[in-house]
Amino acid sequence: MYNKYNNLYLLLGKENVNMDSYKQLKAKIPCKETGIEIKRTLCDICSPGVHCGIDAYVKDGKVIKIEGTKEHPMNKGLLCTKGLCNREYIYREDRIKTPLKRIGKRGEGKFKPISWDEAYREIAEKLNRVKSEYGAKHVAFFTGYGKWYRPFLQRFASSFGSPNYGTESSSCSTSAQMAGNVATGRNFTMQDMENAKTYLGWGFNPYYSKFLNSVNLIKLKEKGLKFIIVDPRITPTTQKLADLHLRIKPGTDGALALGMANLFIQKDLIDREYIEKHVHGFNEYKEYVKLFDLDTVSRITGVSKDNIVKAVEMCHKVHFV
């Protein structure tokens, strides 16, 4: 006899589906009756330093549900919005599944699918032609966000004979690493969050990026950690964490930083012994930041003079990072 549960015939592969089977399938319960299995995997959408654990509910080789792995040491079952959207990320309609060859003028957006063999052959022919006519150093290799294959691409560029290798990190984390090397001699200086009393966050928003940080930061705030957040926007971080929100005009970050530096120097709130031993070009820097007096910085950034002074005082009075 037909009933509404027989609509699951194609999913379960049997007739006369009962109420229990219907409920199990609708709830995506992994069991023999539903044919749903849980596959343990990792989220590869964001930073490779995170890679949150994922429980992928799979039926007939297709992911039907995503959850965080509770036992995973990194995310402990938590996933951000991007992580929870892994199913949509995998099966989105505009996902590129084959190599595409441009058939129109550059910028027209006209492409046609070709096979991998065709793509490899055409790429090899063009690379070797350029190398033969102009030399390997006239070829640049650049990759976007995907990180897992970067070592292979860099090795390929080196084998080809070109030193011109770059990634989106060249204007992201790599620039931060270079600044860290110049300033401290280390790629990334670890933040002593447990002992800090004030945290200065520039465009810092763990609720949207590296959301796992927010869990620990909330605990630290409850213990007394003060937050200064520099951001043109009102965000969950400015609402939940910030004790002082410096809401600058977009693009005026540099002026605020230089103005705060000027105040530190003018008020003699600096470590002169460290500067004399380890800092090159301080006198020139000291003269330059004089251009960014309090009135000028307030006018450029839109932040009140009182809040700029308050931020400097908060940083000076306690150990801050």
Image (spheres, rainbow, N blue to C red):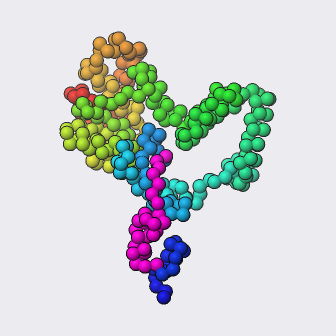
Q: Residue furthest bottom?
A: 1
* Identity of the residue drawn at 46% across and 85% down: 3
* Front residue of this view, candidates 162 and 34: 34
Specify the quadrant of the image occupied by residue 278: top left
Up the image or down, 74 lies above or below 139; here it is: below
Is 318 on the left or on the right of 191, as rendered? left
Up the image or down, 294 lies above or below 246; here it is: above
* Identity of the residue drawn at 49% across and 47% down: 45
If the image is split into quadrants, where does the C terminus sit?
top left
Up the image or down, 248 lies above or below 131; here it is: below
**Place of residue 106 in the rendered image (x, y in percent of width and height, measured from the top left):** 70, 47
Q: Residue furthest front?
A: 32
Q: Does residue 233 belong to the magenta stretch?
A: no
Q: Does residue 19 belong to the magenta stretch?
A: yes
Is 123 on the left or on the right of 298, as rendered? right
Q: Is residue 165 visible?
A: yes
Q: Is residue 234 visible?
A: no
* Identity of the residue drawn at 31% across and 34% down: 200
* Identity of the residue drawn at 33% across and 30% down: 191
Specify the quadrant of the image occupied by residue 306: top left
What span is colored magenta in the figure? 17-44
**Place of residue 314 in the rendered image (x, y in percent of width and height, measured from the top left):** 23, 32
Q: Residue furthest top?
A: 277
How many marks the image carries: the answer is: 0
* Front residue of this view, candidates 250 and 124: 124
* Front residue of this view, candidates 165 and 42: 42
**Place of residue 155 in the rendered image (x, y in percent of width and height, measured from the top left):** 63, 30
